[in-house]
Image (cartoon, grey):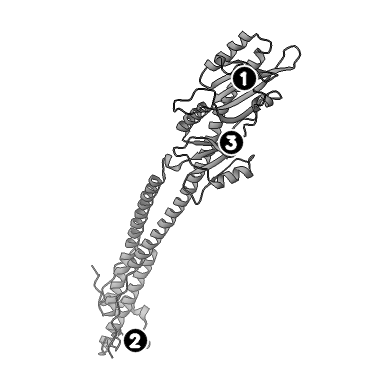
Amino acid sequence: MRRMQKKPLPSVFGWIAITLIVSVLCAALFVAYIVTQRSNLAQQQLRHDIVLRGADAVGLSFNTALKREWDSLHAVARNISNSSKQEIDDFMDAVAQTGNQVAWSGFADLGGEILSGSNRLREGQDVNERRWFREGLRQPNVGNVFASSSLERDDSDRKQRLLNLSTPVFDEQTGEVTGVVIFSLRMAWVESFLTRAREQLNIDVVVQNREGEIIVDTRDTIRDLPEAAVAQASLGRDLPGTFQLLEQAEGLYAFSPNFVSDELPDFGWRVFAVLDPSKLTDVMPQLLQTSVIAVSIAVIFVLLSTLSVARVVLRPIEDLVTTATEMVEADFNYPRESRSSQEAVDLSRALARIQASLALHQQAISADGHPSLQLLENSADVTPIKEGDSIDNATDQTWKQNPTRRKS
């Protein structure tokens, strides 16, 4: 019967090398996956912090500028309570000439007639039905953004958009209301202020009015706000939060209900801070590249060091295996004792004793005239042992009579 030819099996060193390489590669892939996931989470959290902190920073600077105009309005109201017409005119002109924030300022009496206006504009006009006047008689008030028809057009030949701030004027002696003073702030100034803040912080600002119309948008492309952002702002006006849109790639939105300070009247604005990820430096590729390099160096070091140790430990054992194979073929060369490991030492000593025992019995059988070895069908050489032979007692005598060759 013909034997089936078996494929040669890999050596122990080969098994160790294959197992080690596979294990190290799996560990490296696992580490790379964990690092990637953690880095993505950290980057996402960092973006959340950036947009929230950016919204707070823009809101703080905007409130500082807005409160300055608000305090100026009240200062003028206190100073014109018992002033003459000329003095009031001087105040109104000074307000309009200071900076570029106020487009027009004026004073209306209790009857709703404008007694004084900056640059004498709108004087004598009846504003009894205007919201800023009616609300201003009762308390400080902020109106809605509107396009003015009485002021000159802007550089783009468009009507100037204004925001009215009004407050009552009280008589210093009686404390009664004598009229209403008004500041008409330019929305162009508000937009330019928020645009400068955007350039410094990389945070866009979108402002909606009470009707949900966008009145300020510092984004490069003006578009409607996502419904998810508007819905969250409507449901949680007092709870600032941040969320990332899953179905749209427009960026990260944060609703800031406290954008306008509580020290100021309710503007009725809903302010959103928008972070465009494309404007941020993406550190993920560099981080992943550094992680891959570090993991690769660690993998190479582990492989080289482990395989070197495995080679040092297994090389003597391979030599002992060769010696054992030669013993099977009746070549009794004395094995070299290995001290690479305790197991190799024990194995070399055991092989030496086995070799001595086989050599002793070979000589004993040859002395009696019998064959020293019998070849069996399975090609294994076996030395028969006579009854009464003592292996341990005859070993020393055999080595003295016929010492074996030391394997070089």
Residue at position x 47%, y 45% from top? 250
Residues under labels 3 and 2: Cα distance? 109 Å
- Disc 2 marks which residue? 385
Of label 2 and label 1, which has the lower sequence position? 1
Give the numbered dot on residue 125.
1
Residue 249 x, y percent position in the rendering = 46, 47
| Amino acid marked by disc 3 | Asn
Residue nearer the viewer, 108 or 321: 108
Residues under labels 2 and 1: Cα distance? 136 Å
Look at discs 3 and 2 and give the one toward the viewer.
Answer: 3
- What is the secondary structure assignment of the residue under circle 3? loop
Q: Which of the two residues, 87 or 243, is positioned nearer the viewer here?
A: 87
Where disc 2 sits, the SS reads loop
Which numbered marker is on residue 209? Answer: 3
Mark toward the start of the polypeptide (1 vs 3): 1
**Number of other residues with Cα within 10 Å of mark 1, as a class: few under 14, some 14 to 19, many 20 or more:** some
Circle nearer the viewer, 2 or 1: 1
Specify the amino acid type for callout 2: Ile
310 lies left or right of 66: left
Give the residue type that dot 1 points to: Gln
Residue 345 rendering spot, x and y as whole percentages: 36, 66
Q: Is residue 366 left or right of residue 166?
A: left
